[in-house]
């Protein structure tokens, strides 16, 4: 029993050690380029959108669920927001707010499929992934949409001093996520449900309502990530979010959130996001091909989950 | 050896951390006999047969099969030595045919392909041997429960089982199916198979067995020759014991006001339950496992829907549709399966205690952490939860302390009616006494307790009044001066009912 406590401590700190080791390796291998201020700002821009999306995913995985629709929601928000601004001439802020509401609604739809109908989360969110990827193509006709008002750059391109706005949004979201998990009663509910759904229900938690909330939040954060990404790229593509959910899941799981539910901390997820972000950036700097990057990320995901499952096995034996 | 014993268990003892499941049980099974094994719930019957199957490793004791001695069984050893167990849950695969199930895991092959035809022929022979009519090609999911059980038995016989252990085989069956199962059992006895037959239905034991072994509290009590035994004697042996355990004294605290009244409540398998519970009263709910007591608790707690009837709580008709609603009304449930339904094991003591009231102690969803902490500390002190601090995870606590955390949670939620389902199951003796004291505190402070218990002694020792359920219906009510374990057992087995009917 004592062992698992100290093992957890090592595990939660180990992730930061991994991050530091990674930074050192890339710093040396890239001949210093990796650590230049320019590149650090670059990394913060690159990680911002999946950092934001990882917060919702953290909640979902905490209750032993999964949300595969995140990449599609990001694509959908890109296309819809761009369409409203460019094709409909809508005010940028109105378009952003409508997009976020739609993203939250998709999340709620996931919640209803999982909680009320009882479709396994994997299938329910895979279905909406397919649906909203399709809808995005239907709206855009597969063509990129661009030509936004320059002010739209605020979410992804502008900076406050040296710090990109999108990084600030991400930091604010992490703070919010951490607040929800630690200071609000919802966080207590998430851990309770992830630990034991039946006992949580019998302790007076309306588990289904909480599930709705969690999937809605996951949709919301994915939507926000989509806005940041759209602002950064300046053009809505129907392929933009494809497969992003796997990057996000990797970050969350790498950050120590157990796929079995009930265990995990926001700070770990921050580390997970930084590791994947710098890994991607470092590999690009070192001219590693895109396909090799996929292989590496896949391995990282398998190893992260493997460690989680092995520690679970170790504990129960 | 004078007797021809096929299976002998000698001084089997099984300890779990904090609990002794089997103290000392000895069992001897003669070749070709049916031995009835009886005992109260929790007497250790299941643990004992699991020792035979290899699912449980005894702490000490010997197992002898056909004279060969073992310290422990493994599932493989058990199979090799001809021991087969028919559990209440079957191991059939619904999507496969009867024949395929019969040869599950060891199909007849022709080269690398499965020889379906040979399997079907063999299965037909096996079924015919037992004189049961099952089409070997029928998918198991289309067969009745009775036939599914027959397939299990046929499978055991096919694998040359010499000892067949049947755990409450009649429980899932209809009356007609029970009759055909009896015929199979009798046929097997003629063929020289030895059978241990576990049932709480004494009529079945009398009908089938040659001898009857009684165990109680994990100890061997007596073995009787069936024709010489009587129902009264068996009940006496199963429950009759001196009150060895002390119960903490309670000052008289029963008030006249009726807190809870049930009028013909039906639902979740129960029918027409009517009862009254007063403030300051401990009402015991007795009965056998599966009598519908837990089911009634689930209905009251809003976990399962009520079909008809009225629940009146503090003078108002209520109909809780979720545990949340029940909790808000002041009803609490301390469930039987603490680890699955009661405590949130991976959460801290503090979180567990505050879980039902988080919304109440939060403003704009932000928890008032001072109140949260103070609550946890209050109940930790009040009910003496032994822990280094309230941040400790509940899974690291002993059973008794976990039970206290669950109780602390309901005290924090200000519950008026607390339903205990087997309050001291799996809790060691010292902690039991503390739980009893806490139950006393509850009623002395004007709360009401509905206590489900399968431990006769506890039921009698703690209740002010006892209601007995059998198969989803009330079969008896006893006032304190009428408490008597034989009567309760008789009500619980439904025997009194039948006697009266005659």
Image: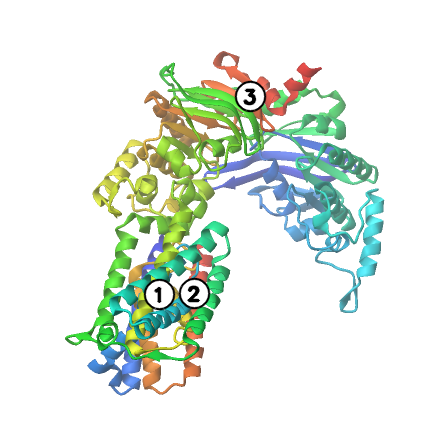
Q: Which residue is mark 1?
A: A222
Mark 3 packing: few (<14 Cα in 10 Å), some, or many (20+)? Answer: few
> So how many labels did they put on this image?
3
* The residue positioned farthest toward the top in the image shown: B481
Mark 2 belongs to chain: A
Q: On screen, B489 above or below A158? A: above
Q: Is residue A103 visible?
A: yes
Q: Which residue is mark 3?
A: B241
Asked whether, in this view, residue B101 is left or right of residue B355, the answer is right
**Which residue is rendered at x = 72% and y = 52% of the image?**
B80
Q: Is residue A302 visible?
A: no
Q: Position of residue A231 (x, y in %)?
A: 28, 74
Do the residues marked 3 and 1 share a common chain?
no
Question: Between marks 1 and 2, how big is the CA–CA gap?
Answer: 9 Å
Mark 3 belongs to chain: B
Mark 1 belongs to chain: A
Q: On screen, B20 above or below B129? A: above
Q: Position of residue A30 (x, y in %)?
A: 29, 86
Describe the element under mark 2 as helix, strand or loop.
loop
Q: On screen, B214 above or below A52? A: above
Describe the element under mark 3 as helix, strand or loop.
loop
Describe the element under mark 1 as helix, strand or loop.
helix
Between B85 and A52, the residue placed more toward the observer is A52
Asked whether, in this view, residue A14 is left or right of residue B204, the answer is left
Instruction: Mark 1 or mark 2: name the one nearer the start of the chain.
Output: 2
Q: Which residue is mark 2?
A: A69
Between B322 and A199, the residue placed more toward the observer is B322
Q: Quadrant of residue B343?
A: top left
Mark 1 packing: few (<14 Cα in 10 Å), some, or many (20+)? Answer: many
């Amino acid at each position: 029993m004592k062992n698992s406590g100290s093992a957890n401590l090592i595990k939660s700190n180990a992730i930061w050690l991994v991050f530091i080791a990674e930074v050192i390796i890339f710093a040396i291998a890239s001949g210093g380029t990796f650590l230049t201020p320019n590149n650090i700002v670059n990394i913060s821009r690159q990680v911002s959108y999946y950092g934001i999306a990882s917060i919702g995913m953290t909640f979902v995985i905490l209750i032993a669920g999964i949300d595969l629709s995140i990449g599609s929601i990001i694509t959908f928000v890109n296309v819809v927001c761009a369409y409203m601004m460019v094709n409909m001439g809508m005010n940028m802020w109105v378009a952003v707010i409508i997009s976020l509401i739609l993203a939250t609604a998709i999340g709620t739809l996931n919640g209803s499929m999982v909680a009320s109908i009882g479709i396994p989360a994997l299938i329910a969110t895979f279905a909406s992934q397919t649906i909203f990827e399709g809808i995005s193509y239907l709206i855009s006709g597969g063509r990129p949409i661009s030509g936004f008002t320059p002010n739209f750059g605020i979410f992804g391109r502008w900076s406050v001093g040296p710090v990109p706005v999108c990084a600030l949004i991400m930091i604010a979201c992490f703070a919010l996520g951490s607040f929800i998990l630690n200071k609000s009663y919802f966080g207590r509910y998430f851990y309770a449900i992830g630990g034991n759904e039946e006992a949580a229900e019998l302790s007076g938690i309306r588990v289904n309502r909480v599930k709705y909330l969690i999937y809605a939040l996951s949709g919301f954060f994915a939507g926000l990530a989509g806005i940041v990404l759209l602002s950064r790229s300046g053009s809505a593509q129907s392929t933009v979010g494809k497969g992003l959910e796997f990057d996000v899941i990797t970050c969350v799981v790498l950050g120590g959130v157990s796929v079995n539910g009930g265990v995990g901390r926001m700070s770990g997820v921050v580390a997970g996001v930084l590791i994947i972000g710098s890994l991607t950036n470092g590999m690009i700097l070192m001219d590693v091909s895109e396909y090799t990057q996929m292989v590496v990320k896949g391995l990282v995901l398998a190893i992260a989950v493997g460690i989680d499952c092995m520690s679970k096995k170790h504990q129960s034996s | 050896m004078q007797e021809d014993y096929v299976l002998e268990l000698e001084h089997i003892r099984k300890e779990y951390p904090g609990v002794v499941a089997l103290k000392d049980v000895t069992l001897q099974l003669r070749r070709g006999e049916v031995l009835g094994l009886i005992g109260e719930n929790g007497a250790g019957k299941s643990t004992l047969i699991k020792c035979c199957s290899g699912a449980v490793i005894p702490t000490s004791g010997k197992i002898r099969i056909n004279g060969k001695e073992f310290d422990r069984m493994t599932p493989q050893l058990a199979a090799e030595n001809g021991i087969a167990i028919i559990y209440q849950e079957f191991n059939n695969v619904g999507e496969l045919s009867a024949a395929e199930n019969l040869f599950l895991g060891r199909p007849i092959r022709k080269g690398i392909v499965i020889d379906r035809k040979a399997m079907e022929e063999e299965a037909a022979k096996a079924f015919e041997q037992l004189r049961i009519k099952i089409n070997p090609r029928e998918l198991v999911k289309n067969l009745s429960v009775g036939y599914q059980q027959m397939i299990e038995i046929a499978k055991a016989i096919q694998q040359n089982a010499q000892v067949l252990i049947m755990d409450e085989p009649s429980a899932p069956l209809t009356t007609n199916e029970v009759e055909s199962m009896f015929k199979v059992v009798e046929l097997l006895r003629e063929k020289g198979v030895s059978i241990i037959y576990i049932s709480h239905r004494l009529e079945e034991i009398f009908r089938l067995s040659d001898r009857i072994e009684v165990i109680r509290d994990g100890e061997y009590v007596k073995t009787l020759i069936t024709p010489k035994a009587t129902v009264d004697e068996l009940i006496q042996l199963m429950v009759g014991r001196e009150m060895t355990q002390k119960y903490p004294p309670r000052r008289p605290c029963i008030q006249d006001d009726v807190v809870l009244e049930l009028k013909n409540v039906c639902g979740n398998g129960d029918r027409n339950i009517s009862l009254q519970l007063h403030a300051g009263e401990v009402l015991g709910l007795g009965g056998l496992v599966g009598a519908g007591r837990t089911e009634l608790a689930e209905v009251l707690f809003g976990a399962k829907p009520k079909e008809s009837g009225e629940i009146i709580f503090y003078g108002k008709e209520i109909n809780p549709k979720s545990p949340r609603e029940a909790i808000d009304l002041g009803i609490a449930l301390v469930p039987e399966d603490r680890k699955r339904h009661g405590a949130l094991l991976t959460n801290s003591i503090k979180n567990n205690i505050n879980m039902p009231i988080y919304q109440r102690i939060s403003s704009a969803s932000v928890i008032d952490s001072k109140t949260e902490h103070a609550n946890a500390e209050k109940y930790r002190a009040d009910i003496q939860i032994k822990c280094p601090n309230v941040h400790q995870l509940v899974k690291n606590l002993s059973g008794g302390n976990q039970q206290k955390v669950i109780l602390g949670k309901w005290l924090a939620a200000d519950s008026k009616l607390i339903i205990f389902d087997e309050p001291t199951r799996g809790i060691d003796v010292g902690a039991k006494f503390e739980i009893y004291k806490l139950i006393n505190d509850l009623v002395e402070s004007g709360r009401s307790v509905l206590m489900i218990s399968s431990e006769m002694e506890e039921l009698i020792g703690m209740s002010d009044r006892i209601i007995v359920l059998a198969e989803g219906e009330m079969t008896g009510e006893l006032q304190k001066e009428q408490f008597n374990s034989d009567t309760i057992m008789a009500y619980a087995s439904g025997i009194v009912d039948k006697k009266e009917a005659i």
